[in-house]
Image (cartoon, grey):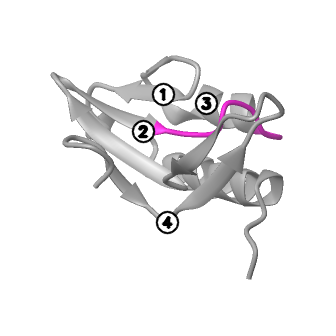
Amino acid sequence: MWGPTIVGFGRYHYKYESGREGDSALAAFAARGRELVVYVAESFEGRDDLLAKLGPHKIGKVCVYIRRLADVDLKVLEKLIARSVADTKSRYPQPN
C-alpha cells in the first residue's frame, strides 16, 4: 500500500535534478469515488497511441481515470501498464 488508498506494485527510487528524491510504486491504482485511477508514466513511446485505443477514459498528468473497467480494452490497459513500468525502470535504474 502507498498511503491509505493506493495499491502499488514494485518499487523504484527517483532523484530529480532539483535534488528532490523519494520512492514510488512501479505500477499503481486506486479507487476514487466512481472511478478507477491507474497511474502511468507521464510520457513514453507509444503512450498516446495506447490511450487512443483504450476506450472511454479521462487523463491527468500521470493518472488514467476509468469509469467502468468493462468499457476499456484490457489488453491495451495491460500494454499501457507494462510499457509504463519498462519506461520507469529505464529512466530510474536501481542499484543491484
Q: Quadrant of the C terminus?
A: bottom right
Horizontal and vertical percent position of residue 47: 71, 35
Labelled disc at residue 51: 3
Residue denoted by label 4: 10
In front of the other: label 3 or label 1? 1
**Separation of marks 4 and 2 at Cα, in angstroms:** 14 Å
Whether residue 60 sits left or right of residue 32 in the image: it is right
- Magenta span: predominant SS is loop
Upstream in the sequence, badge 2 or badge 1?
2
How busy is the neighbourhood of tag 2: few (under 14 within 10 Å), some, or many (20 plus)? many
Labelled disc at residue 38: 2
User: Does the magenta-highlighted stretch encompass residue 40?
Assistant: yes
Indicate the amino acid at tag 4: Gly
Upstream in the sequence, badge 4 or badge 1?
4
How busy is the neighbourhood of tag 3: few (under 14 within 10 Å), some, or many (20 plus)? some
The part of the chain drawn in magenta is 39-46
Q: Quadrant of residue 3?
A: top left
Asked whether disc 2 touches disc 1, contact meaning CB atoms under 8 Å apart, the reply is: yes
Q: Is residue 85 above or below residue 62?
A: below
In front of the other: label 3 or label 4? 4
**Separation of marks 4 and 1 at Cα, in angstroms:** 18 Å
In front of the other: label 4 or label 1? 4
Q: Is residue 73 above or below residue 90?
A: above
Residue denoted by label 1: 63
Asked whether disc 3 touches disc 4, contact meaning CB atoms under 8 Å apart, the reply is: no
Find numbered disc 1 in the image and state the secondary structure of the residue it sits on. Answer: strand
